[in-house]
Image (cartoon, rainbow, N blue to C red):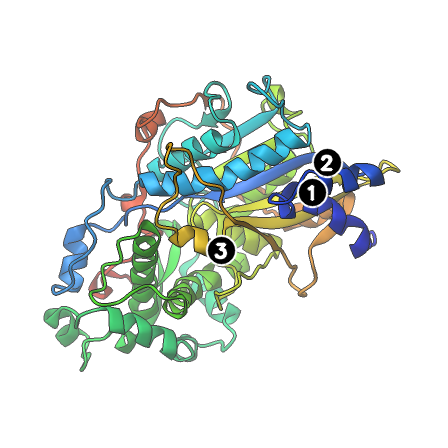
């Protein structure tokens, strides 16, 4: 493997497009003076603030006394506020690209400068609409593609039938990935976070408590299990920690929507950090398991690497400067896990949280001598921005917002930067080729009319995706 570029050498370059988004154009002039040249960025973006996939009926069965938020959109759909937050985040990227000459200062880029591949789930389509409106306001035609149907193997390899999991192998690999190598010990270490969640809930359904012998009717009393779905089409932590993560996710979305449903409580920072701890604790073992991440995310990691080096299947976009994949939370976490990437958000104790609308980037840069290198960042709205009550000016325009360009570390805790050839070799070595579906013969290249995102390509949301939603404990299946 080639030596890593000196940290002082490449760090100035990455700040131009990402870390310096909020700074004056002089930041870009430093790069130009050094002769560094931006080649291409590829980013994987997760959905924005959305309504729960779980139905109101299921939630009320779980906690009959709690009055859950009445969401203004259908199950799993991104809210108007969620779209505004996504637009605000990615408009910063669009401004930086126009400032640095990557996109024209006025008008829409010509064909092939930007390409988006979007999962057909409604939440992803909602988010992609907002991303494009942020990066290229007013540019509506011919920038994104969707595979017809609701199960795109690029985003849902397991559900599409590629590399089905063996239940025992998958469960064992998750447990081996835990620091304590034990589900019970892992859950015990989260007692403070579980107590915070319990404080937000009324006692659980009496029948549920009696069935599982929960003396105080608290989520923290439930045992945690590993559940592998039929035909090896998915895996998740179920029982206590799985249920806690699902509930934490709902409370987090409520907080960012500005409609926190816990009576008498405000979503202060420590509470939110605890909720993020539960959410990521239930997902990280799945994302970081090699058995699972290599089966689920090999196709996405290969697609991102190919796009970074100009090998998109559609020849019309092989010179694109900005390539975007928009998918669900799991594919982002599992792709990062397969690539060995980690990040930390100030104010959130848990590692690798995926804030609404955030994106994991690979960026390709060229040095004056012609050699190239790759760096990675996670872009996300600042936590203060996520809680801002009003995102618009009096004239209706979005206010300028703070964004974070987070350092990405490798498995050894080093800041991630690699020579391009070493990066390509390292990432493609991690890919399981048998888990990569052939490219579809036809993709729909389109941009849906406003409000029509859920209809594009027969889009369907994840309330049918049991690998992304939580179940009541008596509904889980053991491997």
Residue farthest bottom in this picture: 215
Which quadrant of the view contains residue 186? bottom left
Distance from Cα at disc 1 to Cα at disc 2: 9 Å
Image mark for residue 16: 1
Q: Nearer the viewer, mark 1 or mark 2?
A: 1
Image point (40%, 44%), residue name: 48
Q: Nearer the viewer, mark 1 or mark 3?
A: 1
Judged from the image, the secondary structure of the residue bearing numbered disc 1 is helix
Q: Decide: marks 1, 2 in contact (CB < 8 A)?
A: yes
Q: How busy is the neighbourhood of tag 3: few (under 14 within 10 Å), some, or many (20 plus)?
A: many
Residue 478 visible here: no
Residue farthest front in this picture: 394
Image mark for residue 38: 2
Q: How busy is the neighbourhood of tag 2: few (under 14 within 10 Å), some, or many (20 plus)?
A: many
Q: As rendered, which of 157 and 119 lies closer to the eye? A: 119
Where residue 44 appears, as percent x and y from the top left, is 53, 42
Image mark for residue 292: 3
Screen quadrant of the C terminus: bottom left
Residue 212 visible here: yes
Q: As rendered, which of 332 and 260 lies closer to the eye? A: 260
Q: Decide: marks 3, 2 in contact (CB < 8 A)?
A: no
Judged from the image, the secondary structure of the residue bearing numbered disc 2 is strand
Where residue 202 appears, as percent x and y from the top left, is 17, 70
Image point (81%, 50%), residue name: 9
């Amino acid at each position: 493997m080639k030596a890593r570029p000196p940290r002082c050498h490449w760090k100035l370059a990455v700040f131009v497009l990402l870390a310096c988004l909020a700074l004056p154009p002089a930041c870009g002039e430093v790069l130009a003076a050094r002769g560094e040249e931006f080649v291409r960025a590829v980013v994987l973006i997760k959905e924005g603030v959305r309504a729960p996939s779980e139905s109101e009926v299921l939630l009320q069965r779980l906690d009959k006394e709690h009055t859950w938020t009445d969401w203004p959109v259908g199950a799993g759909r991104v809210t108007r506020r969620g779209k505004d937050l996504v637009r605000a985040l990615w408009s910063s990227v669009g401004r930086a690209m126009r400032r640095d000459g990557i996109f024209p200062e006025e008008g829409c880029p010509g064909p092939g400068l930007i390409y988006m591949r979007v999962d057909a789930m409604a939440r992803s389509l909602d988010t992609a609409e907002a991303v494009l409106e942020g990066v290229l306001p007013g540019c509506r035609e011919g920038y994104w593609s969707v595979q017809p149907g609701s199960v795109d193997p690029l985003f849902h390899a397991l559900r599409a039938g590629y590399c089905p999991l063996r239940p025992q192998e998958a469960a064992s690999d998750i447990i081996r990935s835990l620091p304590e190598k034990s589900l019970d010990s892992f859950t015990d270490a989260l007692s403070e976070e579980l107590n915070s969640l319990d404080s937000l809930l009324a006692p659980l359904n009496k029948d549920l408590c009696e069935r599982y012998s929960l003396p105080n009717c608290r989520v923290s009393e439930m045992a945690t299990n590993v559940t592998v779905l039929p035909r090896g089409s998915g895996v998740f932590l179920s029982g206590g920690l799985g249920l806690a993560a699902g509930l934490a996710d709902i409370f987090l979305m409520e907080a960012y929507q500005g409609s926190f449903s816990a009576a008498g409580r405000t979503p202060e920072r420590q509470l939110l950090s605890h909720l993020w701890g539960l959410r990521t604790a239930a997902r990280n073992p799945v994302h970081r398991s090699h058995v699972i991440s290599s089966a689920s995310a090999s196709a996405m990691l290969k697609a991102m690497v190919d796009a970074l080096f100009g090998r998109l299947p559609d020849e019309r976009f092989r010179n694109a400067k900005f390539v975007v994949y928009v998918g669900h939370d799991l594919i982002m976490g599992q792709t990062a896990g397969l690539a060995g990437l980690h990040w930390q958000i100030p104010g959130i104790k848990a590692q690798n949280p995926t804030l609404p609308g955030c994106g994991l980037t690979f960026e390709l840069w060229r040095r004056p001598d012609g050699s190239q290198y790759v760096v990675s960042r996670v872009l996300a709205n600042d936590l203060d921005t996520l809680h801002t009550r009003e995102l618009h000016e009096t004239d209706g325009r979005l206010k300028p917002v703070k964004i974070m360009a987070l350092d990405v570390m490798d498995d050894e805790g080093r800041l991630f930067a690699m020579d391009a050839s070493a990066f390509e070799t390292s990432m493609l070595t991690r890919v399981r080729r048998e888990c990569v579906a052939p490219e579809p013969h036809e993709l729909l290249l389109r941009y849906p009319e406003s409000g029509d995102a859920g209809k594009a390509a027969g889009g369907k949301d994840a309330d049918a995706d049991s690998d992304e939603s939580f179940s009541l404990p008596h509904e889980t299946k053991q491997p």
